Amino acid sequence: MDAHRKEHEKKGKTFIYNWHNRLKLKNSLSVSAKETGEKIKSGAPYVVRFLMWNDGDDEVVRCPDIIRGNVDVDCKLLDDKILYKSDGFPTYHFANVVDDHLMKISHVIRGEEWLPSLALHIKLYDAFGWTTPSFAHLPLILKPSGKGKLSKRDGDQLGFPVFPIQWGEEMKGYREAGFCPRLL
């Protein structure tokens, strides 16, 4: 893979692991099942990738977003994402989709920095045969300087709470405030 990466750099191009070059590399798609099994049994490190596009697939995946409407993504431009790393741990994308499915999440509301991952997440839901939740990608809240997104630490340092309540603070409900439940 390093040789392919260097070859692309010489041409002024960025190397991405995708439909265009995956069969030029040594992987389970380009070698026999027997050789793949032997490599795994030998303890050689490996990753598991999700193929974002193959000949015959729809080229465009439509990504519905509650805020932005439909975002169409050309899958031929995307790289084959790693789902399972060589250290044996799943990537965020894989774990996120599985966790949201198991938790029966119906709506995912997150920052717009995750919008580029939406096509992958939708394709993973489809590959598993799971119902895709509704997605909403919100604009980021920036630091007062305008440089970078606001973090919890920034809010605390600047004197405005990021959380509307403090964790140790007791919140009173209607009953504690004296309202009669039957009258509501």
Image: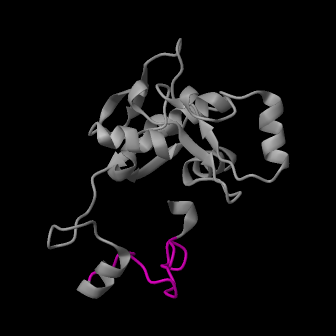
- At 54% across and 69% down in the image, what residue appears? 180
Q: Is residue 93 left or right of residue 152?
A: right
Q: Is residue 32 left or right of residue 11?
A: right
Extreme residue toward the left, this view: 145
Tell which of 107 and 14 is nearer to you. 14
Residue 67 image offset from top left, x and y in percent: 31, 40
Tell which of 122 and 166 is nearer to you. 122
Residue 4: name its quadrant. top left
Tell me how many marks there are: 0
Residue 7: name its quadrant. top left
Question: From where the camera sits, is residue 162 visible?
Answer: yes
Q: Is residue 55 magenta?
A: no
Q: Is residue 110 left or right of residue 93?
A: left
Point out the stretch of residues depicted in magenta.
160-179
Q: Is residue 55 left or right of residue 136?
A: right
Residue 49 image offset from top left, x and y in percent: 61, 39
Extreme residue toward the top, this view: 56
Principal SS element in the magenta part? loop
Tell which of 87 and 163 is nearer to you. 87
- At 28% across and 66% down in the image, what residue appears? 149
Rendered view: 44 above or below 74: below
Residue 179 image offset from top left, x and y in percent: 49, 72
Residue 135 image offset from top left, x and y in percent: 44, 41
